[in-house]
Image (cartoon, rainbow, N blue to C red):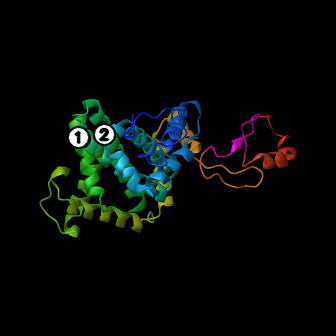
Amino acid sequence: MTSAGMVSSTDTVVPPGLPSGFFLIREAMSEYNRRTEEKRMFGEASYKALLDSIYTDEVEWARFFSHPANQEHTGEVIIILHALVQVYEGRNSTEEWGHALDVLDNVMDHMDGVLRMSRAGEEYFRAQENFHRSANASRLDLNDKTGNHADSPRLLKALCRHELEHGGQKDVHWMMADQMINVVLKNEKALGFTDISSNILEIPDEIILEGYKFTEKIKRDAGLDTMRKAQSMTDNFMNSILPPEMRMKREEEKNNLKLLHCSNCAKQESACGEFKCCTRCKEVVYCGRACQKAHWKAHKKSCGKK
């Protein structure tokens, strides 16, 4: 059901009153629902097409998201955009990552309003809160990668509140908060503050922000001010503490998000799964049939040998 009435799964013409890219939701959800059957994120292209449509036709989609009758489809859009954020985050594509988060936050704001108006059940609010938590955590990670911490204090506090309200105990983000408090306390003279509370929720945002800025200064002084250096250090640390099977799984997940190159012309995919792999060995990919045929003479020597 939509604000324009029933829309069948076989309809090919978008009814009047719905966004012109409405059927992109159907295509993206189809790819999302088969994600467990494939190791690589083959739905990325359809996810991005939906993101681009929402961003380009902002007014049209805003009207759609604000209507209670479209609540189910708005929920599907949130699922898709959340998956796309995870792709860009896993790939460390900071510009695309931030853009996807901006669009996701906007859609979730519309959903918040709809849920309040429709008096939805508790399970809908719980699911929405979990998406907000995940988006906030992703945004905080992005800020750490880019060094832009303008809203990091707000995000950190929101995540800490969520852990207390929904888990009943202090978890990973409280550990991050404790580390930030230690930074502030150890350097309170340098930061110009005294009598700082040990509870992150009671510390003014501007003090926490100074703590983040001080941390960035330490990174710069240590030569870790570029994302590549900081990420390399993080990867080395994680690999040193994870058991072998978890290290392998983590590496596999990263590889599944990589954009591959055509084995003949070296052209790079624009999205995961754009190029087709050799059906026999599944070890190489090609941008098209022409490149596959051109490369066969060289590839047949190793095809299927592993």
**Residue at 29% across, 30% down:** 123
* Amino acid carrying mark 2 in the image: Pro
**Residue 85 appears anywhere in the view:** yes
* Amino acid carrying mark 1 in the image: Met
Q: Quadrant of the N terminus?
A: top left
Whether residue 169 sits left or right of residue 202 in the image: it is right
Camera-side residue: 186 or 63?
A: 63
Circle 1 residue: 117
Return the x and y of residue 165 as percentages of the image width and height: 21, 37
Q: Secondary structure at mark 1?
A: helix
Whether residue 162 sits left or right of residue 65 in the image: it is left
Does 289 sit above or below residue 221? above
**Residue at 18% across, 50% down:** 201
Return the x and y of residue 288 as percentages of the image width and height: 75, 47
Q: Which mark is residue 204?
A: none
Q: Secondary structure at mark 2?
A: helix
Return the x and y of residue 280 as percentages of the image width and height: 77, 34
Circle 2 residue: 68
| Magenta stretch contains residue 284 | yes
**Residue 137 appears anywhere in the view:** no
Circles 1, 2 touching at the beta carbon (< 8 Å): yes
Return the x and y of residue 272 as percentages of the image width and height: 60, 46
In three-dimensional space, the C-alpha distance between marks 1 and 2, rounded to whole angstroms, equals: 8 Å
User: Which range is magenta?
Assistant: 273-285
